[in-house]
Image (tube, rainbow, N blue to C red):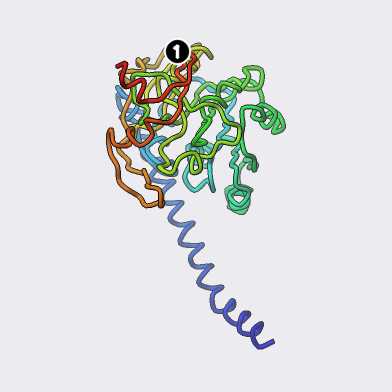
Amino acid sequence: MHNQFLKKLAQGFNAPIFHRLDAIRNEIEQNRLLLGKQYAFVLQSRKIVNLSDAEFKIFSQWGEDGIIQYLISQIPIPNKMFIEFGVENYRESNTRFLLVNNNWSGLVMDGDARNIEQIRSMPLYWQHNLEAKAAFITAENINSLIQESGICGDIGILSIDIDGNDYWVWKAISEETISPRIVIIEYNSVFGKERAVTIPYTKNFKRTEAHFSNLYFGASLNALCLLAKEKGYKFVGSNSAGNNAFFVRHDIAENLPIRSCRDGYLESKFREGRDETGKLMFWAGMKRREMIGHLPVVDLESGEIVTLQNLDGEI
């Protein structure tokens, strides 16, 4: 009884603080949104040579918000719908600014149900036409997950960032399910720019469990460019952070500069590698590649499973 009284008393004291924090958070987000509108307006009068010239960050992890605003200003998008998966709690994402600034609609998915609960509790969830779904995405279930949402056909944007089977999941998405005009997909620059390689497909792949370094995941940019060509997309560039590639469907890409995969490759500079104990080691450059050089990758040009060390010996 005494403990319950103290708990209620503490809650009573804390309530005004939490309300004030919510108000501050909302005010900050409104200011960020206003700043983003200014950036987007300035973009309209700028000459963009490289996609990185268009970058600005409001809710995206890097400069993707600006790149997206530039791309949607250059190509016709009648169906303003997006799908993004690997969004975590949506505090940082590629489509959140698009949702609140441009009033697009969309579907977001994440493998952690707690993240989805957080998204559903956010004001933007009732303020906009957004569906948030908890699902561990695989090549086997991605089409059915999209179909269950009711989204189909010609849509604006597909954004893929699942730290693992990104290549295989995009490959699995049927054109009959969706035909996005813009595809944003993460690449692993540690795999280099010379080869088209990806991790072998493992249905339950988790980056944090695959190798202690946290550097073994995804696909090279070259691999994604090959897949994009198969699917009818043209590569238009990468973000300056060197981890996200942008593709536009070939039938609407005539107003955009098309880049070669080699010229458009940018090496990431972030140092997220860890040792066996989980300690952040700040490895940079080729040291990151050395840490995962012995692990298997699929060479998409030969179809063989090799290692980065094998491939490095051939270059």
Picture coordinates of residue 191, whole percent (x, y):
37, 27
Label 1 sits on a secondary structure element that is: loop
Residue at 32% in and 48% down: 281
Q: Nearer the viewer, residue 251 or 262?
A: 262
| Quadrant of res 289 | top left
Q: Nearer the viewer, residue 117 or 51?
A: 117
Residue at 59% in and 20% down: 179
On the picture, is 124 further left or further right than 151? left
Can I make out residue 223 in this image?
A: yes
Q: Nearer the viewer, residue 268 or 279?
A: 279
Can I make out residue 224 in this image?
A: no
| Quadrant of res 314 | top left
Picture quarter with the N terminus: bottom right
Picture coordinates of residue 37, whole percent (x, y):
41, 40
Picture coordinates of residue 198, whole percent (x, y):
46, 25
Tell me the kind of residue under disc 1. Answer: Glu
Residue at 53% in and 73% down: 16
Q: Nearer the viewer, residue 153 or 298?
A: 298
**Residue wearing tag 1:** 301
On the picture, is 22 further left or further right than 255? right
On the picture, is 281 further left or further right than 87? left
